[in-house]
Amino acid sequence: MQKRALGTSGLEIAPLVLGGNVFGWTADRDASFAVLDAFVDAGFNAVDTADVYSRWAPGHQGGESETVLGEWIKARKARDRIVLITKVGSEMPAGKGLKAAYIQSACEASLKRLGVDHIDLYFSHFPDKETPIAETLEAHQRLIAQGKVRAVGGSNYDAANLKEALDAAGGSRARYTVLQPHYNLVVRDQFEGALEHLCAKEGLGVIPYFALASGFLTGKYRSESDLTKSARGGRMKDLVKGRGLDILGALDKVSARHNATPAQVALAWLMARPGVTAPIASATTAAQLKELAPAAALSLTAEDITELTL
């Protein structure tokens, strides 16, 4: 499968990134292993996780996803087969934020859980208003110098935050080379416009999360009676009406023309966006992953894209 350059990070990835937020949560160890096996067997290579996954689940502390992923890497001897992405900054038992000392200790904790000697792409999970960006970038540069991280990026940064970080980079400070925004057919205003233009101007790679709008763009949530279908269903209440249903209608039409599924079309729309390197999508079963994989080979027409972009 043809790889895409991930901005100026020096990394190359296939056009779909596997979201690891479900590992150790809605996908147990065996299910996670099956999904990861299916993912790399299909020719994909980038896996995204975070130290905080899945702290929100009852009885979890964070680190569950990294631990499961690390066990899979060890069991399959797969370190060289994947581009490994994780994040720092969300609240964990040991701390939170982007102060230098915490970034160093959090990275070392992630490396231990993952069972690896380096992380390919390390994200600042959220901007930290209490820490000067220069301090954060200097800490990232030290990790790069130590060989513990290859490249760094910003997740959930708006245009102003990102520009500040890019302006502060250089010398002893690392440069963000990748952005991870919230972006999909439903939620477009958080990336399109100033942020998208800044990424294009500065040559950043872009890997959007919630590519399927937490499952809404699969088409399985079409009325309030569908909201109990999964742990994420409660998020869909405002989507199963108005513009949300219009988007599903457009997905249905385009899907029928291509003999594809709504999820495949929604991912293909993101893959076709000029500023997007690869969307992130999660799967809790190997069957779900195999259903998403054909999106990488789906070529949408200009008419399709216009019809979908409501």
Image (cartoon, rainbow, N blue to C red):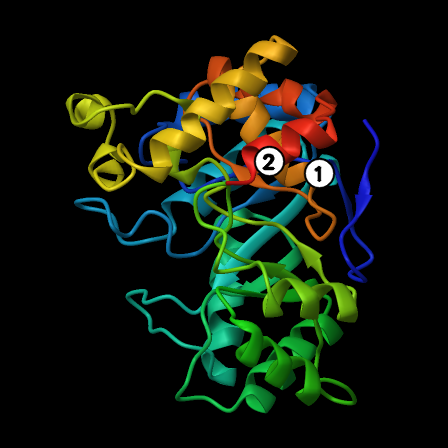
Amino acid of disc 2: Ile
How many numbered marks, from 0 up? Answer: 2
- Residue highlighted by disc 1: 272
Give the image location of residue 262, x and y in percent.
Answer: 50, 21
Q: Which mark is residue 73?
A: 2
Q: Could you tell me if residue 119 is visible in this image?
A: no
What's the amino acid at mark 1?
Ala
Q: CA distance from mark 1 to mark 2?
A: 31 Å
- In front of the other: 125 or 30: 125
Task: Return the x and y of residue 65 as percentages of the image width and height.
Answer: 42, 43
Q: Secondary structure at mark 2?
A: helix
Residue 61 location, quadrant? bottom left
The residue at 57%/23% (across/down) is 264
Q: Earlier in the sequence, mark 1 or mark 2?
A: 2
Residue at 84% x, 32% y is 2
**Mark drawn on residue 227:** none
Structural crowding at the residue carrying mark 1, measured as other residues with C-alpha within 10 Å and reported as few (<14), some (14–19) or many (≥20) = some
Quadrant of the image containing the N terminus = top right
Identify which residue, 159 or 45, lies in the foreground: 159
Residue 21 pos. (x, y %): 41, 42
Residue nearest the viewer, comparing 281 with 226: 226
The x and y percentages for residue 120 are 69, 55
Q: Is residue 89 above or below residue 305?
A: below
Would residue 223 appear left or right of 272 to someone viewing this image? left
In this rendering, position of residue 189 left or right of residue 164: left
Q: Residue at x 61, y 61 (%)?
A: 179
Residue at 73 percent of width and 26 percent of height: 301
**Please, what secondary structure does the residue beneath circle 1 have?**
helix
